[in-house]
Amino acid sequence: MKILVTGANGQLGRALQKVLINEEIELLLTDTKEMDITDANSVKKVFNKFEPEIVINCAAFTNVDKCETEEELAFKINAEGPRNLVKMCLEYDACLVHISTDYVFDGEKSEPYDEEDIPNPQSVYGKSKLLAEQIILENMSKYFIIRTAWMFGDGENFVRKVVQNAKNKNEVTVVDDQFGSPTSSMELAKVINLLISSNKYGIYHASCEGYCNWAQFAEQIFEELNLNVKVKHVKSNEYVSKVKRPKNSILTNKKLLENFNYKMKDWQNALKDYISGGYVMSDLTKKVLVTGANGYLGRHVVKELLNRGYEVLAADFRYDGVDERAIRVEEPIFSGKENIYELMGKPDVCIHLAWRNGFVHNDDSHILDLPSHYTFIKNMIAGGLKSISIMGTMHEVGYWEGAVDEHTPTNPISLYGIAKDALRNITFNLTMNKDVSVHWLRAYYIMGDDLKNNSIFSKLVQAEQEGKEKFPFTSGKNKYDFITVQELAKQIVAASVQDQITGIINVCTGEPISLADKVESFIKENDFKIKLEYGAYPDRPYDSDAIWGDATKIRKILENEK
């Protein structure tokens, strides 16, 4: 069974990745980069290549306040996007699972809403979501429209927001005149798995059993976390908002019970499971400093940390590409000041990515900057930093055939590799016999986000856009460990926020693939017309014929997260 998931990086998308684990399921995970649902050509291209049997649409513009001020965008994403999916689902006779919302109702009913109640949205968000429902109902017979509410999971949500707001406070203010059923993304994913195994199509409500108001929800969160925080109850009219939010968001799962005799978990136990899972909640108060936050890799690491619920301190020269949720650090990391730890905001963890000219392997800056890196790390540790992760590289190893592990001897050839190798030895020397966790994260061949870096893939995209017919290339025989920048960011964060596994950690796939195969695949996947001109450049003498990372430690870290 081929299943296409849109919005795969969101709360529900991530939950589906854990629930839809079946040897009979081939899962294609997409987000905006892989498939923009508002672009009909982008949708058509993915459908033609993958030929899905089921499409689960988790993509949406869910910021209800911004929907009011960006109405055109809200309808484009929440209604026109689904219209494009409907068109292609009909062409491929695929079933569409569409996630809708309690906001299609006005909230004035005194009892819970069931699937037969007539929608009457009061906000742009609700209206855009209802239009998507109508498009599906008017054109399809094989569909599941699933209305849910108050979702929490792996991503931004009320649970994380209310805990973050409670930091260093004895009291938080929360409204108590809006009622609903807090719903776990994992429990919702289980419902989706149940529905797609049937042909009982239609509209379904799916929210966890029971209900509460937002203030009661906050109180339950603090109770589960054993936080001594008081919740001050207030009314909605005490907040100025352009959005009319439903007073009653309680949904009853009538059809799930009638058609499947299925009851979802009650919201209190679902919350307990979520918190006890420990994916981010146990570390939610951690502050993480990311240096080089606006770099090719830094932007993705910052976003991944924020999506996991951490407080992120971002340090760089510029911030135009840094997620706006991050706190910008004004002090330059290489100021040389002894109190740099305090000036950086006293982070619990530092992920040190800052590095110049990473793609220019013999630039003098690698050696010239080394004293500044040394001073920064030394003063951060002296100030009280307890956990540091530093970006390493396969170029520390030099020429090597086969898998690289933490015991592989290093003999770097380029200035880049020499500098990184020296910094690794310096860092372990600085932290010797100190209560500091060190993660030396050794990366291999990074790809993705291909207009924002200087890799061969970036140059290939540029050449294609310029209409060039040939692309000068080496023999392409060298085998490397390729990893997307998005996956690399996830591995960096996973390794950095834990202290059970430390030392040299390969952040990689552990799978060697020839450069030629990877580039030819990239050309084919993107329907480029450009051809590789093999042998136009000689292979670099310091590049190994085949080098990849031993992924044992990172796989263990990722497994521990589950």
Image (cartoon, grey):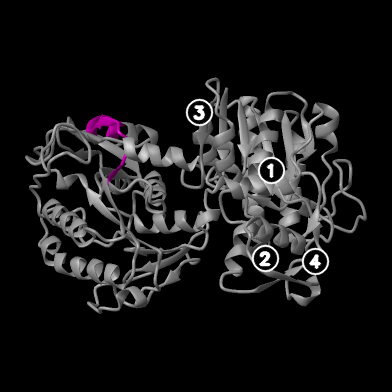
Callout 4 secondary element: loop
Q: Is residue 20 left or right of residue 125?
A: left
According to the image, label 2 marks what residue?
65
**Magenta span covers which residues?**
504-520
Alpha-carbon span between mark 3 and mark 1 = 22 Å
Alpha-carbon span between mark 4 and mark 1 = 26 Å
According to the image, label 3 marks what residue?
50
Is residue 505 a member of the stretch shown in magenta? yes
Circle 4: residue type: Asp
Query: Which residue occupies the extreme top position in the image?
Result: 24
According to the image, label 4 marks what residue?
176
Alpha-carbon span between mark 4 and mark 3 = 47 Å
Circle 3: residue type: Phe
Circle 1: residue type: Ile
According to the image, label 1 marks what residue?
99
Local crowd at mark 4 within 10 Å, few (<14), some, or many (≥20)?
Answer: some
Query: Which residue occupies the extreme right position in the image?
Result: 110
Residue in view at x 19 percent, y 66 percent = 374
